[in-house]
Image: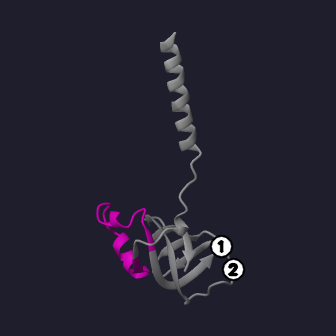
Amino acid sequence: MTLKRLLFAGGLVALAIATALYFQPALDRSEMDASTALSADALYEAMAGASADQNSSYLDQVVSIAGRVLKQDGQVLILEPGVACRLEAMVSESEWKAGDEVQVKGRVLGYDDMYEEVQVDFAIVE
């Protein structure tokens, strides 16, 4: 009988731990400090055409990117030469014009071969 109670108690503890881990809030990457500051050109050159080993230093890292706006499309701010930053907050369509200089902080997702862009999410304009 005590073995059944012990197994039942162990199961309850495991269930409680699993529930706590499942409902743990996700990290807010927009509030994290940037690990590196670089220009959009430097990030694009490092990610485009590089092997997975070469660009792994920026993958899943929060970086601060300085660059010139190419265009804004909804929540996506595209910096020259091809860094697509998905912004956290909704912005008006006339917030930035082509040619404006901005400083953006966000997490680097990787290089998209199809669109030839570096993808950045959780982006905020500093």
Pick whichever of labels 1 and 2 is earlier in the sequence: 1
Indicate the colouring scheme.
one colour
Residue 112: horizontal and vertical position, in percent? 45, 65
**Which residue is located at x 61 percent, y 68 percent?**
88
Residue 89 relative to residue 122: left or right: right
Residue stretch in magenta: 37-63
**Which residue is located at x 58 percent, y 87 percent?**
98
Secondary structure under the numbered disc 1 in the rendered image:
loop
**Which residue is located at x 48 percent, y 75 percent?**
83
Q: Is residue 116 visible?
A: no
Do the residues bearing badges 1 and 2 touch, measured as CB atoms within 8 Å? yes
Give yes or no for residue 45 being in the magenta stretch. yes
Q: Is residue 64 visible?
A: yes
In-front residue for pair 53/122: 122
What is the spatial separation of the Cα atoms under label 1 and label 2, in whole angstroms? 6 Å
Residue 97: horizontal and vertical position, in percent? 61, 87
Please tell me in which quadrant of the rendered image residue 113 appears: bottom left
Q: Return the mark for residue 93.
A: 2
Q: Return the mark for residue 74.
A: 1
In-front residue for pair 80/56: 56
**Which residue is located at x 34 percent, y 69 percent?**
49
Amino acid bearing label 2: Glu
Amino acid bearing label 1: Gly
Rendered-image quadrant of the C terminus: bottom right
Crowd rating for badge 1 (residues with CA inside 10 Å; few <14, some 14–19, many 20+) = few
Give yes or no for residue 103 being in the magenta stretch. no
